[in-house]
Amino acid sequence: MLSLFDNKYYKSTGNPRKLVVFIHGYNGSPEAIDYAVQGLREKLTDCVIVVPRAPFVCEKNGDNLQWLSFYKVDPEVRFRNPDASVEEIFDIFDHLGDDFAEIGMQMNAFITEQQKTWNVDDAHTYVMGFSQGAMISVYTALSRRTLLAGCIAVAGIIPGKSRLEKEIVSKPPFLLLHGKDDATVQHKTLPTTVAWFKEHDISFEVYEFDNLAHRMNDAEMQKVAEFINS
């Protein structure tokens, strides 16, 4: 039986009692985030990390992948423009609600598939993502019918919030991480993301990192490991 997505996994030492599904970003691949995955793997115990591969060729770069298109609602890539307001940036991602809902449903099916493979339940399963993958992880965790152990969003933003607000059925604890020099998913959006979590009574921790652009670093992976190992 073929998996929903082509994927690669990284097994830590011991028998895995926990599962982490780590979703790569736009214009990315499992290989593109390997540096972070391997760094995280070294810090986890009794855990397996599974990295699904996006099914679509990236519209920006034919050598990489995407989960969904940004260009169809933002052909000028306004969300990266420093002059774009936070409200405009959120509105751009709000218009992608149907796309995030679809991939969130598929990702939840993938998580269930992986749980059967590794014999791990929801109480020991985490979904994690970077950039577009972070947005997908947020939508996936909140719309999942059963409560996950946690969700980690690195350099993300609330996706499709108008639709997502109607589909929240689970509220696992969240870990939000963002670089202060991020000019792609702009750091200035983070306070609005934090306010949204508070408004919806969702438990979260948030950490910001100096001198970090749109990339992951070891300090972030340390925070992730502490969140999962606790």
Image (tube, rainbow, N blue to C red):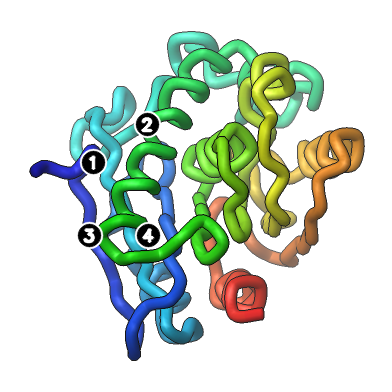
Q: Position of residue 183 (x, y in %)?
A: 64, 42
| 98 sits left or right of 154 in the view | left
Mark 2 or 3, nearer chain start: 3
Give neighbour class at mark 3: few <14, some 14-19, many 20+ (Cα, 10 Å). few
The residue where tag 3 is placed is 8
| 85 sits left or right of 198 in the view | left
**CA separation in Å, label 4 and label 2:** 21 Å
Of tags 1 and 4, the one toward the viewer is 1
Of tags 4 and 2, the one toward the viewer is 2
Please name the amino acid that badge 1 sits on. Answer: Phe
Mark 4 or 2, nearer chain start: 4
Of tags 2 and 3, the one toward the viewer is 2
The residue where tag 4 is placed is 33
The residue where tag 1 is placed is 5
User: At x 72% / y 65%, what residue is drawn?
Assistant: 209
Give neighbour class at mark 4: few <14, some 14-19, many 20+ (Cα, 10 Å). some
The residue where tag 2 is placed is 106
Residue at the bottom extreme of this rendering: 14
